[in-house]
Image (tube, coloured by chain):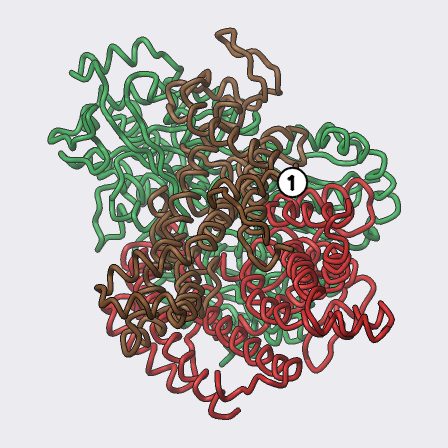
Amino acid sequence: MTLFLIRRLQQSIVVLLVMSFVVFAGVFAIGNPIDSLISPEATEQEREKAISQLGLDQPLYAQYFVFLKNVSRGELGTSFVHNRPAIKLILERLPATLELTVAALVFAIIVGIPLGLLAGLNTESLIGRGILSSSILFFSLPTFWVGLMMILLFSINLGWLPTTGRGETVEIWGIHASFLTLDGLRHLAMPAVNLGLYPLALIIRLTASGTQETIPLEYMKLAKAKGLRRRRIIFIHLLKNIMIPIVTVIGLQFSVILAFAVVTESIFAWPGMGRLIIDSINLLDRPVIVAYLLVTVVVFLIVNILVDILYSILDPRVRLGGM
Amino acid sequence: MIKKILTRALPVCMVLMGAGAAAADELTVATPNDPSIDPHYLYVSTNAAYGRHVFGKLLDRDGDARVKADLAVSWKNIDEFTWEFNLREGVTFHDGSTFDAEDVIFSFNRVPNVPNNPASYESNTNMIETITATGPYTLVIKTKNPYPLLLRRISGVSIVSAEAVEGGTTADFTSGQIAVGTGPYKFSAFVPGDRYELVRNEDYWGEQPAYDKVIFRIMPDPASRMAALLGGDVDIVEGFSPSSVETLEAREGFYVAQRASARTLWLYVDIQNDQSPFVTDLDGNPMDNSPLKDARVREAMSIAIDRDAIVTHVMGGLAESANQLVPAGWFSHNPDIDSISIDVKRAKSLLAEAGYADGFGLTVHAPNDRYVNDEKIAQAVAQMLARIGIITQVETMPKSVYFGRLNRQEFSLSMIGWDNSLTGSSLMSLSAAFHTREKDRGYGGWNAGGYSNADFDAAVEAAEKEFDTVKQEKYLNEAMRILIQQDRGAIPLHSQFTILGVRDGVRYEPRVDEHFSAMLAQPSE
Amino acid sequence: MSIPSVQTPFKRFISEYVERKTAVFAFLLLVFVLLTAFLGPFLTMQNPYDLAQITIMESGLAPGSESIDGNTFWLGTDDQGRDLVSAIVFGLRISIMVGIISGVLAVVIGTSVGIVSAYVGGRIDNLIMRVVDLFLGFPSFLIALICLAVLGRGADKVVLALVLSQWANFARIVRGVAIAEREKEYMDAARGLALPKSRIIFRHLLPNCLAPLIVVATMNVAFSITLEASLSFLGVGLPITQPSLGLLIANGYEYILTGKYWLSFYPGLSLLITVASINLVADRMRDVLNPRMKK
C-alpha cells in the first residue's frame, strides 16, 4: 500500500514538473499580465518598473528557475492580479467546487443506478429503451445551453429556485458548505443537476449494460434456482457485481466533471475555482494557473487512490500493490 | 417555446418582486468585477469605483467628473509649483482613529511602494516632488514641473489610516483586517469571486447614503446577471448588455438607467510602417508600400463606416456617434470639426484617386472582453470596409493579449476606447496616444499608430502646462483639428453609454466615468 | 448465432442494425445532417462568412422576415445580420469537420501509439506509457482550454488542441486491448510464420481491434463536437467571423432572455440533433458488434 502510494506520488511529481514548465513557457509566449492590467495613463517607465518588479523581464529559464526555487520552499508564487499566495486563492475556492462536483455525482448515482437497473432488467420494454435513448440525449446536450434553460424555467418562469450564487453557507471545520442549509441546497440544486447530467447518462448506461451482462451468468441463475427473492438477487448479487465498473468510471469521471465545472460555475455564478481559472487564463495570471493545475492533479490522485481502495473492498481479489 | 415561457414569466416575476425583494435598507448589486480591497493595489477603473465606498481622498471627482472637496476643504496655488491644502477636521477612520495630515503623507508614500503591483496608482503621484505637513490639518505639495492637472490627479489617491496600515500588506486588506478608510461605507465581508459586503458608516462626516447595507454579487457572465435581476435576486446590474435593454424596458418592474459616458472608441491606423503587418494586396501578399500611409485612404475608410448603423444595430441606440476623440458637450470638444457622414461613393473615388480602385486586404484587431460589444463593433466595421473593396478580416482576443500587442504596434487597424474623465478633456488621450513616442518625457506611451506631427506635439505640450483653461482649450482644439481633420490620424467611432439594469423601487443615477457608486442609489417613493 | 449463416459479416451487421427502429431513424437523420453539412453550403442564400454579403442593417430579424433584396430569412438573422439558415449550414459543416478530423485523428494517433507500445514492449512501452500518464493526469477539457489560450483562435488550432487532449485516452485503451490480443493464438501463429512486425501489427493485430475502435471513434466525433462547442462558449476556439454551431449558440446566448430566442435555439437544436444522431448510431453499432450482448 505504501509502495503503491509512493509510486503514484513519484509519477505525479514528474507530471507536475513537466506540466508546470509547459504552462510556464506557454503563458510566457502569449504575453504578460501587465499589459492587460496597467492603466493607459501609465508612462512607459512605470510599465517597465512594474514588469521588472514582478520579475517578468527575466528570460524564461531564469523565471522558471526562480519558480522551482520557491516551490522547493513550499511556495507557488503570488498571484499577479490578487497579490496573495496563489495556492491560498485556489484552496479558498476548492471546497465550493468540490461540493458542486460531489453533489453532481451524488445526483447522478442516486438517479442513475435505479434508472439503469430498470432499463437493464427491461431491455425490450418501452421503459427500458426509453431510458437508454434519453440517456443518449443527456450525453448530447451542451451543458451551457441546458444551464440557462434551467434558469429560465425554474427560476424565472416557475420561481422555485434562486438563479445564481451559493446561498447561505455553514462553516464546518473551517470550510463553508452549502448543503447543510435549506437556502444553500436550493442554490446547489440547479448547478449540481446541470453538471450531473453527463455522469448521469454514463451511469445509466453502465448500470444497464452491466445488468444485461450479469443476468445470464451462472451464479445469477444459481441464485434464482435457489429460490432467492428477486429483490435480494438484484440488490445484493447483481448490484455488487456491477458496482466495480461503475466505481471505476466515477473515479475517472471525477476529474472530467471537476474540469467541466468551469462551464457550470460561470453560468450559475458559483464561486468555485473553475471561474478563477478562466479569469486567470484571461489575465495570464501564471502563478494561479500553475497552482490550479497542481491542485487538480492532487485531487485527481486522491480520488484515484480512493477508487483503488474501494475496489479492493468490493472485489477482494484486487491487491493494491500489484497495480 | 421560449417566447411562451417569457410571456408566462411576466406575472410570476411581478409576484416575485413583491415577495422576494430585498428589504429597503439593503442594496444588492450584480457586477462582473472582482474588487481589490487594497485601494493602492491594481489601478483599474473598477477598483477606483469600489474604493470610493470605503476610502476618502483629498479631492474626489463627482458623477459629472468635476473636482469636489472630500478630505481637503480648501486649496490654493502658491506658485506654479506649490499647492496648499487645508484638511477637514474631526473626521475619524472606521476603526475610530482620527484623520490628519500624517495619514495623507503616509498614503501618498505608500502608493508607489506596494510590492508586486502590476498596475500601480503612481501615475497619480509621480509628478510630486515633496509633500509636507505644515500643521496637523495643513499640507503643502510641490510638483516637479508646473502641473495644472494635480487636482484631478490626486483624486486617484485613497487615504488610508497610517496607524492601521503601517506594515500591513495587500492580503491584510483582503482579509478586512486593515481595510479602514473614512468613506461612507465600512468593510463588512469579502468572499473572493463571490461577494463583497459593505455596511453604512454611521459616523460619516458627509451626507449619509440611503442604504444600510450594500452587497456586491460578483457574476462575470452577462446572461447570469440579467437572470439574477429578473429572478429578483439582485436590485441593480452593472455592465448591462445593450442587447437586453429592449427586453428589460418592455418588462413591468424594471428599467434601464443610462448615461452617455466619457469613453470614446476610435481606430488606430498604422501610419508609420511602409510594410504594415496586416495590410495585403488582394491575393494576400504583403505590400511594400502601405496604402494606410495615404491620408486619402484613411479618409475613405472613415467615411465608409456607417456610425449611425453601428449605434442603432450594434449598440441598441445606447451610444453616440463621434467625429473626434471626446464626446460632444465636453471641455475641449472642438465644434469646428466636421461631422463624418457615410459616403460610399466618395470613399470609393478617394480610394481610386490614391491608386487602390480595386481595394486591398486588411485585418482589424479588437479586444473581446473590454468595451461594450467590442467584438461586434469590429465585425460591423469590417463589413463596411468590405463594401468599398477593402477586404477586411477580423481578429479579436482577450485584453491580456490584445493590449500588449497593441502597445508593441503589431496591428494595422486596431480598436481602443479611451475614458476621458480623468482629465475631463482630450489632454490625456492626445498626449498618450498620439504624441510622438518619447519614453523619457512620458509621451506617446500608447501611440499604437505611430502618428507623429511636430505641430501637434507642440500644441499638446502647451496645453499640458497651461493653467488658464480658456487658453488650454484652444491648444487642445488645435491639436484635435490637426489630428482628425488635417492628418486623419485616427478614425473616431462613437462614445459609449453606461448602462445598468435596475429594479423599480430603486433610483440610480449613473456616473459619467462608468464607475458604480452605491451612494447614488436610493429607494424611490 | 448457432445457426450456420451464409451472410457476410457486413450484411449480418446491417441486418442486425436495422432491427431497432430508433437506430434506423438516427442513421437516416445522420445522413441528412451530413448531406446538409457538405452540400448545403452550395445551396444557401448567402455565404455567411463573406462580410461583404451581410449587413448589420439586417441584424436580429425574427424568423420569416424579409431581407432588403426580397429573400426570406426563414430562421431569422443573427446579431451581425447573417441569415441563420445559412449560418447553421456553414456552422454545421465546420463543427462536423472539426469533430471528424480531430475525433478520428485522436483515435488514429492514440491507436497507433497504443498498438506499437503494446507490441514493442519493454523500455519504449514504458516511456510511451509515462507520456500517456502525463496527459491523462489532466482532464482533457483543461488541456484543450489551456492549449487554445496559448495558441489563439483558428480551426486548425482547435483540431490540434482537441487531438492533444484526447489521444492519450485511446492509447491507453488500445494498449490494453492489444496486450490481450497479443497473447491469443492467432498472434502466436503469425509470429510462428516469422512475419515482419509491421505486417503483424497492421494485417493481424489491427483488424482484430477494429470493430470496437470504429465505435469509439464515432462516439469521439460526437464528443469532439460537444467539446468544441463548450470551448467556443468560453471564448476560445474558432474565429468569430466563421462561427461553428458552438459559437453561434454562444453568440446567441446573451439574447436568450431577450425574446430573440432563435439566435441560440436553432443552432442549439441543430447541435443536439447532430450529436444525438451520431451517438445513437454508435450505440447501436456497439450493441451489434459486442459479442457478449448477443443471445
Quarter residue B350 falls in = top left
Above-or-below relation of A313 to C266:
below
Residue located at (44% from left, 66% from top): C177
Q: Give the quadrant of residue A205.
A: bottom right
Question: Which residue: 71% across, 32% down?
Answer: B2
- Taking the image as shown, residue B373 lies to the left or right of residue B211, namely left
Neighbour tally class for label 1: few under 14, some 14-19, many 20 plus, Cα within 10 Å: few
Q: Which chain is green?
A: B
Residue at image mark 1? C20
Q: Is residue A295 left or right of residue B2?
A: left
Give the x, y percent position of residue A87: 49, 75
Q: B197 and A194: which one is in front?
A: A194
> Could you say which chain is coloured brown in the image?
C
Q: Looking at the image, which is closer to me, C88 or B282? A: C88
Q: Is there any visible trace of residue B112 in the rendered image?
A: no
User: Which residue occupies the foreground of this view, C85 or C273?
Assistant: C273
- Residue C123 seen anywhere in this rendered image of the structure: yes
Q: Name the residue: 14% across, 35% down.
A: B275
Q: Nearer the viewer, residue A62 or A132?
A: A132
| A297 relative position to B191: left or right | left
Query: Where C155 falls versus B218 (above or below)?
Result: above
* Depicted C38 relative to depicted B158: above or below: above
Amino acid at circle 1: Arg
Q: Residue at x 21, y 13 (%)?
A: B357
Give the percent coordinates (x, y) of residue A120.
72, 57
Question: Given the current orientation, which residue lies at the most extreme bottom position?
Answer: A2
- Point out the residue furthest to the top here: C70
Label 1: chain letter: C
Location of residue C249 with respect to B214 vertically, above or below: above
In the rendered image, residue A70, in percent from the top left (x then y), is placed at 37, 82
Query: Any idea which chain is the red one in this picture?
Result: A
